[in-house]
Image (cartoon, grey):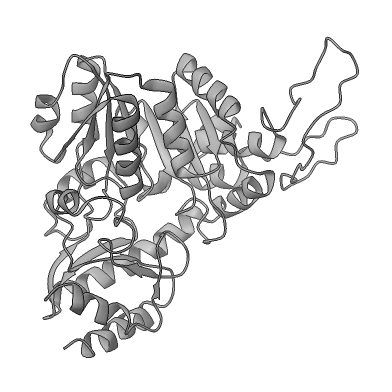
Amino acid sequence: MSQQNFNFDTCSIHIGEKPDFSEGSKSEVVAPIYLSTTYARKEVKNPGYFQYSRCDNPTRFALEQRYASLEKTRYGLAFASGLAAEATVLFTLINPGDHIIGFDDLYGGTKRLFNQWKEKYKIAVSLVDATKTHLVEEAIRPETKIIWLETPTNPLLKICDIAAISEIAHRHHILLIVDNTFLSPCFQNPSVFGADIIVHSVTKYIAGHSDVIGGAVMLNDHALYERLKFNQNSLGTVPSPFDCYLVLRGLKTLSVRMGKHQSNALEVARYLEKHPKVAKVYYPGLPSHPQYETNLKQAGGFGGMVSFEIKGGEQEAIQFLESLELFTLAESLGGVESLIEHPALMTHSSITAKEREQAGIKDSLIRVSVGIEDEHDLLNDLEQAFEKVR
């Protein structure tokens, strides 16, 4: 049976780690951690595939094969972090004078990267509400090179129509990039709907255990892959072999974890939607979400991220966050443990107050990465924290 015909759960366990029964092979079931920085050759003019670990490494090679299989693309590239992946993509594709269109509710680190490139390389960036597809097309200029989306977004969990925006992008000969971190390949494959490049912060759901930093790029175009791979090597934005091993291990349980993340998140969102001290809840799995139907059309799930606005403001939000006992007050997301944070003061503090206001990130906003603990324990912790809010 061809590995190309395997379904997601099988690919997440086996792709890249097929035992080698050739003579002299040890036939490992799990890809080893290849720590060697360089590889011997028998003949001067006849190197093997692996020569130097920044260029290629067997553990990373196994991981990149799996990345491609899970996102239904031809190629996968592994990076030292999500921002290393994004920076390499920008370095490869953007020149001075170019224009980028981005979702107005992008991850703060992505916006920070855009702002740095605006100043240093004189590029232009237009942030628009991509839930309104016509606004994306209206923002296009002759010098537009990239449309950059997240769906769902961070932290307001907005959903945009990937297929519709892909049609617009390709009609204007523009590349479409989709950050698929929040739903993971388990629930969404943007390439199926026309995305040219998919990026991930692997640190989050793909690795899943809050113990490795990583990034990924997946795509189909061979020429573009070669350009990105060249810069992955020349910039040295590669992960260590041990990090690759950790991600390979984490991926084996991705679908199991995502199912529990989602079921817990749905219960938390339903609880918050009914709570008298909550002003608004953002979760794509609630029928009240304005893009609920759009998400159903392009995704197989809703994910484990929930955001909400507590009644009051910054002080009430802080009081609530510091009263929690089971939820951990920390940045990041996607691990098996439940994390909670204040975007304006934590993950999105690097962007200006004006940018946060324009994106709708209020001082009362709280973002929750719902873990895979017992759902009743999570709800009880939220309730006792709400009781302490004046």
Task: From the viewer's perspective, tell me whether residue 199 is left or right of residue 174.
Answer: right
Residue found at the far top of this picture: 45
Q: Nearer the viewer, residue 160 or 70?
A: 160
Question: In the picture, residue 97 is in which quadrant?
Answer: top left
Q: Quadrant of residue 308?
A: bottom left
Residue at figure coordinates x 31%, y 52% from the top left: 350
Residue 267 picture location, percent across and down: 27, 71
* Most foreground residue, 77 or 140: 140
Question: 250 or 81: nearer the eye?
Answer: 81
Q: Does residue 254 lie above or below 271 as drawn?
A: above
Picture coordinates of residue 151, whole percent (x, y): 27, 44
Q: Quadrant of residue 383?
A: bottom left
* Observer able to see residue 72: no
Residue shown at 36% from the left, 47% from the top: 187
Q: In this view, does 36 lie to the left or right of 107?
A: right
Judge whether residue 381 can be spotted in this image.
Answer: yes
